[in-house]
Image (cartoon, rainbow, N blue to C red):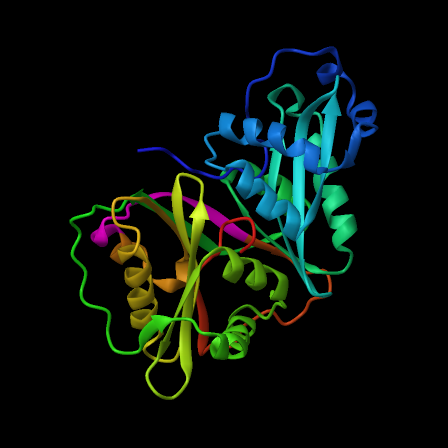
Amino acid sequence: MPHLGHRHINCLFAFKPARALHAPVDEMAQHLTALRADHLPDAVRQSAALGWPYREADWRFAFDLGSGFAVEADGRLVGTAMWWPYGETHASVGMIIVDPGMQGRGLGRALMGKLLHEARSRTVFLNATQEGLPLYTQLGFVARGQVFQHQAIWPAETVLANAPAGVRPMQAADDQRVRRLDLAATKMDRTALLDALFAAGTAMVIDRGAGVSAYACAREFGHGVVIGPVVATGADGAADAMDLIAALADRARGRFVRIDVTESSGLSAWLTETGLPCVGHAVSMVRDIQARAMDADADVRLFALSNQSFG
């Protein structure tokens, strides 16, 4: 089974030795520039060397939504870092890759410094591997739970319960209600992200006559399909989230399916039972220099991320 694990810092991938790779970090910092569209083919090769499944279309999707920085050495891309603003108060960071020849030289810290400078006073979120925890902690990030990565080829013969009444494709009339649900679950203005997800993928909702109470999205990503975000509300939120995930997975029979669920969702064991095993986890972290109240509406919950970089 392909492993799609994310590494957001201290990432290792192979390059031939180059003189510039052994330069002091302050000299390397002079090669730090804005990430450009023409960097993306090299970024695909770098992420592929890490085992990330990103296609160039996936990098382009991320690039069009946000911005970032690149480090060049001898005309080659040797480092990347990206961030995505959610309004004026929040942001996420990710897709941070550092050449192995620069490990321990402070390049990861320099890239993160540039991202945090750009984010200004925003509350910043990320999902980290164990290797990245020391640096992120030093930069003021605090752990707030875990994300569990589930993935597998969804067997064509898998039989799921028929979709219950109320599960249907999202319609134009649902748009504002879905966006309000997302805002209540995340406390972030994710307008641009939702625009892009709905344009690129398939969205489904639950509406049992009292209005939309849950939504989920699926889109092409990596080796197949990624399901997320998944947002649901009320006492039946977990059951509704499972119904939506099952409905979207059913459309992907015989294909590779991935979903990243929050620890608080309680869905990890269920996903394993349905045929999507957990292949890894990340630590969710936040840096909140304004000490904002970050608790979302307790009645509306984020069960699955759009992916580990965007949240």
Q: Residue at x 24, y 69 (%)?
A: 163
Q: In the rendered view, tell whether residue 17 sits above or below residue 160.
A: above
Residue 232 at x, y percent in the picture:
41, 72
Number of marks present in the image shown: 0
Residue 106 at x, y percent in the picture:
71, 30
Residue 131 at x, y percent in the picture:
53, 35
Q: In the rendered view, tell whether residue 48 sits above or below residue 300.
A: above
Residue 164 at x, y percent in the picture:
24, 74
Instruction: State whether residue 94 appears in this view.
Output: no
Point out the stretch of residues depicted in magenta: 272-284
Q: Residue at x 34, y 67 (%)?
A: 241
Q: In the rendered view, tell whether residue 178 sits above or below residue 142.
A: below
Q: Residue at x 19, y 67 (%)?
A: 162
Quadrant of the rendered structure where residue 88 is? bottom right
Instruction: State whether residue 194 appears in this view.
Output: yes
- Residue 279 lies in the magenta stretch: yes
| Drawn side of residue 108 relative to residue 298, left or right | right
| Drawn side of residue 36 relative to residue 249, left or right | right
- Residue 9 lies in the magenta stretch: no
Quadrant for the N terminus in the image: top left
Q: In the rendered view, tell whether residue 304 sits above or below residue 78.
A: below
